Every structure is written in structure tokens, then in C-alpha cells.
Amino acid sequence: MVSSDQARVLFAMALSYPLAYPYRTSFLRSPSAKHAYSIVTTTSLWVALFGAEGYIQLIISILITYFLVAKWGRNRCGAAIVFAVVFGHLCINRIMKQWRNYTDMQYDFTAPQLILVIKLTSFAWSYHDGGLPSERIHEEQRNSAVHTYPNLLEFIGFALFVPGFFSGPAFNLSEYVRFSKNEAYPESPSQGEWSSSAANMGEANILAIKKLAVSVCCFFGFVTINDYLGLNYHYALTDNFVRRFSIIARILYFVIPGFAQRLKFYGIWELAEGACIMSGIGYNGTGSDGKARWDRLSNVNIVKLELASNLKEVFDNWNIMTAKWLRQTVYVRIKNDALRDTTPGGTSRSGGLASLATFLVSAAWHGFYPGYYLTFTSGAFFLQVARVVRKYVRPFFANPQSQFHRYHSIYDAVTTAATSVVLNFLVGAFIYLRWDYSIEVWWSRCFLLCHFAALIVFLSLEYFGLGKYFSNLQRRWEAKASKE
């Protein structure tokens, strides 16, 4: 059931809807009024519900970032130093919390600190990019670059923006500044400008309410499946689970609690995104059809994720804003040797090193429980297996010249089902947190069947010649078709 701390944070997020509305009114017409409003509302709401102790740490982290970037922000290593300080602060808090109570999963100040880390480290890199010639940085970095240093009120208002404070979504300073000044977003497809006209206000209200309704449905589904029906991951730790299901049925069982756990995250992210839409910061210009888009801060694409035919599609549509942060502040910086040469065409380190660093930062950002690392390492392995399958097997069904092209829809259905089974099986370790629980279920209850099956497929295609055979067979079919 919902704990008291979860009830309080859900109450705060729901309250962010009416608190978001004034951002679009004449009451907060000036940017300074918006900044002050963010600071007052977030501070009052957090202290009233959770106390001031942890909140003080967040304010200190914000101030340290502000003054460090002001001093070293244009320096090549300045952004990296800020990243180390801010991210290190989060890691220390996470380790201390885990040390005090290993199973303590209560919501506390380390939850909004996750979002703050994204905002503060992104700001450090954006200010660094703002000091470089535009031709020396990538387009994505160019759009978020900060050229003028913000004043303290503006920066704290950005960090404490109430609709995205409790669980995200995160965004960069340049987006917030343009929003606070009601300016056009340069990267929008039609250069559209959000305005507080009655039409736009009504459209935003309707969409925000829809997001709220989806969120309520997701939470209801989670509670029904996880609590009322008892179909959760912890049931797999019971003796009855072993007696009741065969080995295949045990693996298939995880599809149900896995979906329930995703419903919980869907509910949180849809609720937060709706509040951002209500404030107006979610506006993303207009599409080719002339209709306004409100997906600037979308953190998940539920339909694409649930129908994903491979793990890459899952990762591309899950926790989107965090993935964007990892790409911009870790992967791109290392792959393009950003600490020494930010030129896009400059000397690059290996993509493998960048991927490894991104994985480590992502894992540490989540925490230090063994279950997280079991899930992430296994996910990386299954992602590589999926790439090999797409390389050697998919052309048989995707290529119109192939004899098996008529079965393309069946192939897509099979890969979608396989992706769902693997994803929900791996997420168990993420939920269990503990090493012993994760290994007990993976090995003692399911005999690592998914892992061994994937390993056989990978070795057969990549090292035992089956992939080469498939490629040669495909080329022969293409040659035969060209002659005909």
C-alpha cells in the first residue's frame, strides 16, 4: 500500500497543478516574479511536508554550483569539477542513507536531489559551451548553451521550479530562461512562441488534465495488481511460487509485476509532465500540421515502450530526460574528448569508454544497491544480443526480396514478446535491490534461462558462423532477385 511519505509526495505533486497555473497569468508577468514564486512555493511546500534538514543541503548544493561555475565555468575542466562536486554530494548522501538502513526506500531529499544533479551539471556544461564559438560545438549543445551568466534569483528559481522539483522532469537553464521571459524557442520546428492567450491556456489545461487522468489510472492499476491481487515480484521469493509454476511459467509470470512497476513510474511522470504543461514550460512550438506541441519535457512514451521490439526502443522511450542528460554531459563529452578538444571533428576516445562511463554514472545516479548493477549489466548484455539479432536475423524478414518477408509481422510480434519477457525478468533485481534475493530468483528459481538462451544466440550468430551463413544466404537471394 501507499506509505505516508509516498502519500505526501503525491499530494505535493498534485498540488503543483494549481501552483503551476499562475506562471501563465499576468500575476507573474515579469521573470523576477516567476523566480521568486518558484522559490517561495517550493520552499514552503517542502518544509511543510518533509522538514528543513535535507532541504538545506539542496540549497547549499545550488549555491556551491552557482559560485563554482561563475569562477571556473569557462575553463575547460571547470564543468568537470562541478560535475564531480555535485554528483559526489549525491553519492555520499545515497551511501549514508543505505548505510543507516539498507532497506530504507522512503522518499526524502535525495529524490529531488537526483533532479537537481541533472539541472546543475547540465548548467555547468551549458555555460562552458556558451563560451565557445558556435561552430565548435554540436547543435544539441548549441541549443542549450548559456552565453550570459544568470543572476542568483534567476538561478535559484530555475533550480526550485515547483512543477518539476519533486520528481522531474529536468530541463536546462536556457529552456527555463526562455520560458520565464515568454520567448520563442529557437529549436522549435516552426519557431512558434507560446503565449498566454485564452486559446493556448485552454489547450494546455485540457492536456494537463488528461495527463492527470492517465496518472490516476496508472496508480490505480499499480495498486490493484501489486497490492490487491498480490501479483508482485516478492511473490517469486515464496515456496508457493516454485510449487505453482513450471520454469517457463515462472519467467512469463514476471510480465505482470513488471508491467505494474512501470505503471507506477508512468503515473509519476505523467503527473509531473502535466504540471509542467499547466505552467507553460512544456510548450514545444507547433508541428507541421500547425497544431501546438506540448511534449518538450515528456519523460516517457508509454505506447512505444510497451510495443518495443527490442531493448534499444525501450531505453529510447524510458526516462527520456535522464537519458538526454547522460548523453550530453557524459557520453558526448568523453567520446569527443570534450575536456581537451570540444571540436566535433576533433580527436575522439573510443565509444566503448564513453559507453562504460555513461553506464557507471547512470548506475551510481540510481544508487549503490547490487540489484541495480545486476539489472544494468544484464541489460547491456541483452542489448548487445539484440543488436546482433537485428544485424543477422532481421534482414530475412525486413528485406522485401527475402523469401521470409511475408512473415515480417510475425517476426515483429515475436521480438516484441521476447523484449517484454526479458525486460520484466531483468527488472526483478532492480526491485529486490539485494544481491541474495536477485540471485535466488534468477538462478535458483529460473536457472538463468534467459541469460543462457541469449548467450547461445549471441555466440551462434557472432562467433560460431551462423551469422555469416545468414549474411551469405541473404546476399545470394538478393543476387538472384536482381537477375530476375
Image (cartoon, grey):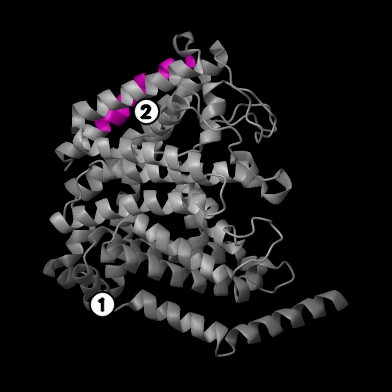
| Disc 1: CA contacts within 10 A as few (<14), some (14-19) or many (>=20) | few
Tell me what residue is drawn at x 51 percent, y 65 percent: 355
Q: Magenta residues?
A: 10-24
Sooner in the amino-acid sequence: mark 1 or mark 2:
2
Quadrant for residue 120, please give it: top left
Tell me what residue is drawn at x 60 percent, y 26 percent: 292
Residue located beneath label 1 in the image = 443
Outermost residue, front side: 71
Image side of residue 94 versus residue 351, left or right: left
Tell me what residue is drawn at x 52 percent, y 20 percent: 203
Tell me what residue is drawn at x 28 percent, y 61 percent: 368
Mainly helix, strand or loop, the magenta region?
helix
- Residue 111 in percent (x, y) is at 29, 44
- Residue 450 in percent (x, y) is at 37, 74
Q: In what element is the residue under mark 2? A: helix
Image side of residue 87 versus residue 437, left or right: right
Q: From the viewer's side, name the closer residue of 157 and 191.
A: 157
| Disc 2: CA contacts within 10 A as few (<14), some (14-19) or many (>=20) | many
Q: Amino acid at mark 2?
A: Val
Q: Please say whether residue 307 is visible from this viewpoint.
A: no
